[in-house]
Amino acid sequence: MVQRQSQREPTPERIRVPATSANLGPGFDTMGLALQLYDEVEVRPAESGQLTVSVEGYGAGEVPLDERHLVLRSLRAAARALGEDVPAAHLHCVNRIPHGRGLGSSAAAIVAGVSAAQLLLGRTTGGKVDRDRVFAVAAELEGHPDNVAPCVYGGFTLAWADAHGWRCRRQDPAAGVSPVACVPTEQLSTEQARGLLPETVPHADAARTAGRAALLSLALTQAPELLLEATEDWLHQPYRGAAMPKSVRLLRTLREEARLPAVISGAGPTVLVLGAPSPTDGADPAQRGDLGDWIGGWAGTNWHICPVPVDTAGVATSVHTSAAPFGMPVELP
Ligand SMILES: Nc1ncnc2c1ncn2[C@@H]1O[C@H](COP(=O)(O)OP(=O)(O)O)[C@@H](O)[C@H]1O
Ligand SMILES: N[C@@H](CCOP(=O)(O)O)C(=O)O
């Protein structure tokens, strides 16, 4: 809860939002996984004045600091949705999720902004945000729910829309799900990658991708040995390949030679490996050693290989008591 101290000095509050990987192969615009790589936003309420922002980490010196800033835009939209005036405050963003890499930086920014609105407008309970409300507003702002859902709820999520609005079910992934991200230096905007998708796809491709998506729900929660088969996709990855040839080459190597369940993370160009190869896929477990090192051997240089365990908490808030109240298990350089 954001409170005023006795000397009228505002007490900062921090919001932590996880990176996410959407699609996971066949679950286009539906499936997502939260990862232990976090952006943080420090919220300092002000007595009067504007809504302002400062940035450190990814995007510093690049993202606009005026009303176009995505966290501020989302905060404003959430205040409007609550029927409230935009509160005066300063937000300080510490960004660790790289932008335009398919790791859900825009969803994290939106969830942070919507959560900040709840903190500043006193709409939290015991300092915790109303997750369902954050999800509803954030999914509407992002336009697709598959990153926003795991960012809000953590774990593995299935999200969809029906006549009542955005819907989501969350599950804990099986212990064998141990994601490793292969992050390139190149960026690809989600908007550009969505523009590469066709209006229609062959019925056979839709049918076999739907079958793999059903299998993926099972593989991620109960049967990780099925992950390689379960992560095949014919709906989006083939159409986007031309915009990320390096990622397509790595994806093929990891899937066909290393027998690893690798996918394009979100709209790319990061490649995400969901876990170790299944013993039934013929890979010698003794050769694998550390999964990140093993993947690095296949990928070569030009990739930042980063184990990113599943985050099970989703969006979290904390009173600012120390420099790093949450602890940061994973940092990219
Ligand atoms: N923390 C942030 N603060 C401000 N803007 C952000 C932030 N994160 C993402 N954005 C905006 O979203 C863009 C990236 O979104 P997108 O193309 O969807 O890629 P992805 O979500 O895969 O990283 C950035 O170029 C920037 O404009
Ligand atoms: N389903 C979306 C997911 C985009 O994820 P991002 O992390 O790249 O923003 C899509 O594939 O367009």
Image (spheres, rainbow, N blue to C red):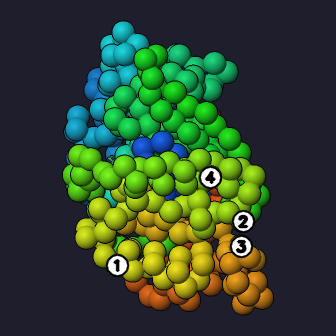
Q: How far, Cα to Cα, is label 3 from label 1?
A: 25 Å
Task: Say whether mark 3 is within 8 Å of ligand 2.
Answer: no
Per the image, the residue denoted by label 3 is 278
Mark 3 residue crowding within 10 angstroms, few (<14) / some (14–19) / many (20+): some
Residue 187 position, x and y percent, is 30, 65
Residue at the disc numbered 4: 215
Tell me where residue 51 sits by quadrant: top left
Q: Residue at x 62, y 52 (%)?
A: 215
**Mark 4 or mark 3, earlier in chain:** 4
The percent coordinates of residue 37 (x first, y second) are 55, 57
Can you tell which of label 1 and label 2 is closer to the viewer? 2
| Residue type (three-letter) at the residue carrying disc 1 | Lys
Front position in the image: 119 or 304: 304
Residue in front for this viewpoint, 213 or 115: 213
Q: Residue at x 43, y 17 (%)?
A: 163
Q: Write down the residue under mark 1.
A: 246
In the rendered view of the protein, which quadrant contains the N terminus? top right
N-terminal of the pair, mark 2 or mark 3, is 2
User: What amino acid is labelled 3 in the image?
Assistant: Ser
